[in-house]
Image (cartoon, coloured by chain):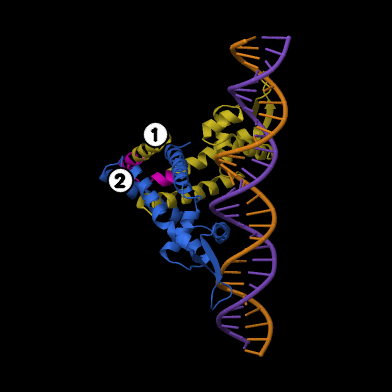
Chain colours: A blue, B yellow, C orange, D purple
Amino acid sequence: MPEFLELHSKTSKLLRAAADAAVQRHGLRLGQDHLLAALWAQDGRTPGEIAAAVNVTTPAVTKLATRLAESGLLERRPDAHDNRLVRLWLTPAGRALQKPIEAERQALEDRITATLTKTERAQLLKALAKIQQVLLSDLA
Amino acid sequence: MPEFLELHSKTSKLLRAAADAAVQRHGLRLGQDHLLAALWAQDGRTPGEIAAAVNVTTPAVTKLATRLAESGLLERRPDAHDNRLVRLWLTPAGRALQKPIEAERQALEDRITATLTKTERAQLLKALAKIQQVLLSDLA
DNA sequence: TCGAGAACGTTAACCGGTAAACGATCTGAT
DNA sequence: ATCAGATCGTTTACCGGTTAACGTTCTCGA
């Protein structure tokens, strides 16, 4: 396997595991925190809006929302003016998770970037941005 | 969401999609190619060996192997000396995929690293290696 | 006004991955 | 020689993700 792909794949897996463990300490699973983050930024959004914001398909949001509702972290409520729309609203429990989860994520980021110098970190971000751009342009 | 985690997450998703599309042109799904690659490197390995080589759990290999066997790309055969062991053997069809899949993967790697200078690429690999090391040391 | 088509969210079927429980086989100390 | 324990692969149950099909509701032009 080519060098970069191999390395990126391994790093991805480890990063995913670390993020999952971090979020799991607060009763969440990976992915659920992204949905909640979308609501922390703006409460009462629709599944479609959230899906676009989180780069995931709408059915994925539907399922996550069902589980988060069962956990009592959000509520489904119909839109007042358009009955096709469903809006997701945080419960107090859902809102209470914002600070601890964000702290957890920041701690992970800090732990990772601590081993890099400022310029190394900047170069890394720049390189990833370039790669992202290439892949995006390939879709068209 | 912290800067690096956000960027890495997006890049990962795009990279995964690109790799999936590439491999899908040859009738495979993402992950199946990794299992095959382990057999291309050394045929007749056991699920446990392959799982360790690919950084995946053994049940994951079991399921992938079942699907690849149904597709006629490999065969399950018991080990001659230890009946607990199962050994996976490539069929001619499975062997025939090696060159096209490896070419596909190399093409993706080239497309990505083409936008980077040699030093940028070296710095990227170095940074990722550092991050990987931090995450690995965190497990202990 | 009314009906065709667009815009939604949900469901169903699939895939790759994990953890936990299970069953079969081998190993080694007694 | 035997039996407790280790070592395997598989099964089961879950989760997040995708695509495709579906039913409901809105919109807008004839």
Query: Residue A16, image x and y in percent?
Result: 46, 45
Residue at coordinates 68% horizontally, 31% vertically from top-left?
Answer: B75
Residue A17 shows in this picture: yes
Magenta segment, which residues? Answer: B110-124
Give the number of the disc on residue A55.
none
Whether residue A89 is situated above or below residue A16 in the rendered picture: below
Check disc 1 and give the amino acid type.
Ser
Quadrant of the rendered structure where residue B66 is? top right
Is residue B112 highlighted in magenta?
yes
Front-most of residues B16 and A92: A92
Give neighbour class at mark 2: few <14, some 14-19, many 20+ (Cα, 10 Å): some
Location of mark 1 (residue): B137
Give the number of the disc on residue A121.
2
> Disc 1: which chain?
B
Front-most of residues A93 and C14: A93
Disc 2 is placed on an element classified as helix
Query: Residue A121, image x and y in percent?
Result: 30, 45
Q: In this view, does B5 lie to the left or right of D30?
A: left
